[in-house]
Amino acid sequence: MMGPEIPLYLTVASFLFATGALGVLLRRNPLIVLLSLEIMLNGANLAFISFARRLGDGDGQIFAVAVMAVAASEVVVGLGLVVALHRRDLELDVDRLSTLRG
Amino acid sequence: MGDFLVWVVWVLAAFACLGSGIAVVTFSNPFYSALALIGNLASLAVLYLLLAAEFVAAAQVLVYAGAVMVMFLFVIAYVGQRADTVWTGGPSWQFVGGVLAGGAILVEVIIAIGLGASGRLRDEADIDAAFGSPAEIGRLFLTDHLLAFEITSIVLLVAAVGGVVLGGQSRRVPEEEASLGR
Amino acid sequence: MEAAAWVCLISPLAGALLITLGGTRIPRRLAAYISTLSVAVSFVASVIVFFALHDRPPDDRIVLSEAWTWLAAGDFGVPLDILIDPLSVFMMLIVSGVGALIVAYSIGYMDGDDEERRYFAYMSLFVFSMLLLVQSANFVLLLVGWGLVGLSSYLLIGHHHERPSAVAAAKKAFIMNALGDATMALAIFLLFWKGAPLGLSEFEYADGTSQTVMTLVALGMLGGAVAKSAQIPLHTWLPDAMEGPTPVSALIHAATMVTAGVYMLVRLHPIFEAAPEVQDLAAGIGAATLVVAGLIALVQTDIKRVIAYSTMSQIGYMFLGAGLGAYVGGMFHLMTHAFFKALLFLAAGIVIHALAGEQDMRNMGGLRRFLPRTRLTFLVGSLALAGIPPLSGFWSKDSILGSALAEGWYGRTLLVVGLAGVFLTGLYTFRMFFLVFEGDVSPFAREHVHAHGHREGPFSMTSVVAVLAVLAAVGGLIAIPGLWNLPLDWLGPVAEPLVEANALQDYVVSAISVALALAGIGVAWAIYGTGRLRIPRVAWLQRLFEKKFYFDEAYDLAFYRPAAATARGWSRFFERPVIQGSIDAVAGGTRRAGGTVSHTQTGLVRSYALALAFGVAVLILVFVSVRQ
């Protein structure tokens, strides 16, 4: 294969994943959180594709497609929530939205 | 020569990917974050092409960058742009904990890769030209992974219905519900 | 004949069930009629059984009739059977006959009571229980009947349950009876353990069992008898039981339940004969009771209580007789006592009814103007009780006293006691008579007498009293010494008396006892009738009698207070800290734990995500290290 070996791709993927994780953990705007979530999912996708190439098995790409579909669904629901929150004039701050406390 | 070119493309795409990823996480304006994400998706598509996953790359651009991100931008525009102070607020241990967790995960994965499944990641398989083509993906979806295919469709349906339900309740908002979260 | 015996037993139970199932749907009067009818049917059936048994030759009069095998365990079995023999038929006639009369009386007495149906259901239940007791053919069934009788007594004493005194009296009766039940049960266990047969018609209990065992068994049985018959020391419940309605006092606490102890002494005479010390003890208890009760009766002011103590005293006579082996005499006195004591109670009931519930004799007087016929019947009852010939009490009491004379030095000692009791009986009975009926009309009576027109009471009440008066008058003529002795002929084969007085002893004793009775009546007349004699005032004696010889106080000190203190101590030092405390600790601890854990539910999505991220980090570490 031409170009970098698989481990380099995997490194990129893990960086992406970690970055997304940091975003999920450290941002307060739910929209940004959702975007960070997308970053994480993309990191995972890259790992899948890399391994698919490495093993010569198309299953990894199938999985990546499935992940994309699920990510899309989850974004739909998440954005629906955000819209609903906005309609009720609630602050878009995950720290404030804490009524499910024990 | 070809190899060199590939390397150059790879480096550009990889750094764009990482950079846009960090941008998504750090911008205070959600609109800019969304745009950064689009950039991220595009660079990822390039990487996919390098890995002989043409169909996935195309789907990434069309579906992800095209549809999902557009939806995102719609909502961000609807909600209005509010810059939020990025790192403040929340319990103080949240910040430390977050960095620690994220860092830990990164380090561990790198180590795992480095330990490299002891060199087994080195060898790539030989692939034929059909690998990663739409025909191949389609064949796999409809034979080996039919169940996944069907379930994914159901998931999408449920999400669509859910989105409609969530979005369509504004007409009956009682006044006291508006105090939630304050 | 067996069918009739079963009908006799089941009929009152059927009546009780019918009333219970009818509930408030049936009118109150109907409940009364059902109950009376059920007991009357029982009486008719027992008469049939009597004649059928009489047809048989005297030595062939023991019949067992088994319904089914009730308890079965391997070889051992306890059948559900009834015993038809002269003794049980004798009791059946008395219980159902006097019972029917008294239940009929209740139709008038309880008219208008709020809970009439419950009363009649329980009366029928009681008659059934008593019949079960006398008809049972084995120890286990006897114990069942014994317990049921105690239960019915409790239910009926506490009929006016809104009165705390009635409830307390019911509990007292039940608890003391339960004590007797317990000793009886222990005795039965002992018999069973030693392998003795449990059927009552088999008399070989003593075969192969040691003397100590038989003594213990006899003691246990005696304990039950003493409790049920209200003899010293388990007698304190009987006066309090007067809280129940008057017919209840008549039926249960005069004619039937309290005589169950005497019945048992006679029925189980083989056991007692095998333990003669216990039998002597029974006689002694009877003698002690008869004189103590007589003394206490002298100072009572409540008319029912005088009659109650009188009952205690007369049963003392029966115990005396049965304890000395004069079984027939004891049973004969049981029968006549049922007549005249029920008569006295029911006549007193008419007085109470006419005075709208007043029972204190100090508020009565001169009632002969208002209740002449009741006075006459009351007089008949009092004379019978005192033992004046030719009324029934004379014949029966003197058969006992005659046997006491014939018994030896112990019997003669008890005879003296018994004769003292005769004097006391005459005295307290006629004190009561003179206080209530003679003299000037008391102001209270003038105000409150409320006769039904010229009738002294409802027909159901007066007719029954009249019948009982006749029975009390002539019931004793079935045994005239020297002429005939029908009770002896009837009961002899089953309960052979150990002693029999000869004619001379009988006449001597009779003469003395009549003289003493007349003396007692005379003194009563002098003090209460004409006022010529003053009552001697000995303060401490007066107090002793009024406090009923301090038995209640003694029991309170000896049993109640320690028990209550122990209970309080346990509650304070064990139950509350340990048991309640442990439960509280568990509950509190769980709540606190929950509270602590709930702090993790911050509601902040980010903290949850952080937890997830840390978990993932740990997992990756695990996977990587495991691989290596």
Image (tube, rainbow, N blue to C red):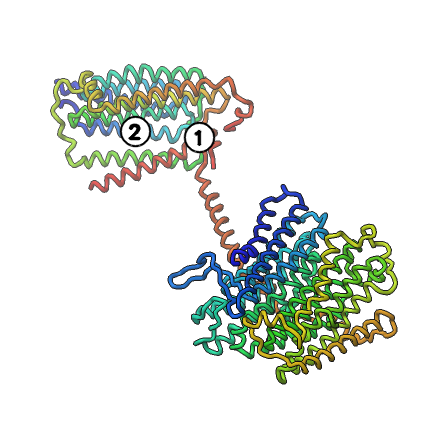
Residue sitting at x 43%, y 36%:
B92
User: Residue C605, relative to residue C141: is it above or below?
Assistant: above
Q: Which mark is residue A17?
A: 2
* Disc 2 chain ID: A
> Is C398 in front, or is C603?
C398
B175 with respect to C351 (left or right): left
Badge number at residue B88: 1
**Quarter placement of the C terminus of chain C:** top left
Mark closer to the observer (2, 1):
2
Q: CA distance from mark 2 to mark 1?
A: 23 Å
Q: Is residue B1 above or below residue C400?
A: above
Pinpoint residue C605: horizontal percent, then vertical percent: 42, 32
The answer to whether dots 2 and 1 both sit on one chain is no
Residue at the spot 23% in from the left edge and 42% down from the top edge: C625
Q: Residue at x 29, y 38 (%)?
A: C619
Tell me where residue B131 appears, x and y as whole percent. Answer: 16, 20
Can residue B8 be spotted in the picture? no
Left-right relation of C584 to B121: right
**Amino acid, disc 2:** Phe
Badge 1: chain ID: B
Q: Quadrant of residue C534?
A: bottom right
Left or right: C497 as drawn, with respect to B141: right
Q: Amino acid at mark 1?
A: Thr
Which SS class for mark 1?
Answer: loop
Residue C291: percent from left, percent from top:
70, 75
